[in-house]
Amino acid sequence: MDAPIQSLLERLQTGWQPATDEIDMRILQQDIHTWIFVGGGIVGLFDGGSFQEHVAGEVLWIDSKQRWALCADVVFWLHEDEPGATNLYANPDGYPRTGS
């Protein structure tokens, strides 16, 4: 696990709740829709110019309300809806949101 992920994991373990603009910019963030747990990871559809299935690495920490999950390689903002709905992280043009 790289240092930014380790640092974020330690912060989450204190009870801190993340916001998109408070996560180290070296950590990939992705909105993911219609997701499920598979093994120790998450599979779902995500917005990134095209809709495709993505399998994340091991889930390290997940919000009790399942709004986000920290995986070994990405922070997922979790949605139960179809791709293209309102995203927490990406603007409609695909670039990260800034501010709250």
Image (cartoon, rainbow, N blue to C red):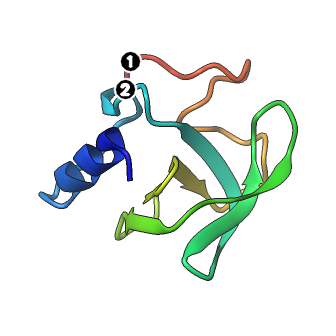
Q: Quadrant of the C terminus?
A: top left
The residue that mark 2 highlights is 21
| Labels in figure, total | 2
SS for callout 2: helix
Count residues near mark 2 (Cα–Cα under 10 Å), then give few for <14, some for 14-19, many for 20+.
few
Q: Amino acid at mark 1?
A: Gly
Residue toward you, 70 or 4: 4
Dividing the picture into quadrants, the one containing residue 55 is bottom right
Secondary element at image label 1: loop
Residue at point 54% right, 33% down? 89
* Residue 91 screen position, x and y as percent: 64, 23
Image-based side of 21 in relation to 36, left or right: left
Instruction: Give the answer, above or below, for where 51 lies relative to 14.
Output: above
Give the residue at x 78% y 47%. Answer: 83
Left or right, residue 48 beside residue 35: right
Which is nearer the eye, 70 or 21?
Answer: 70
Give coordinates of residue 92: x percent, y percent: 72, 23
Question: Which residue is pictured at 76% across the width and 34% down the height?
Answer: 48
C-beta proximity under 8 Å, tags 1 and 2: yes
Quadrant for residue 80, please give it.
bottom right
Instruction: Give the CA distance from mark 1 to mark 2.
Output: 6 Å
Amino acid type, residue under disc 2 in the picture = Asp
Characterize the local packing of mark 1: few (<14), some (14-19) or many (20 or more) Cα atoms within 10 angstroms.
few
Mark closer to the chain start, 1 or 2: 2
In this rendering, position of residue 35 left or right of residue 74: right
Between label 1 and label 2, give the one nearer the viewer: 2
Residue at x 66% of width, y 51% of height: 32
Q: Mark number for residue 99? A: 1
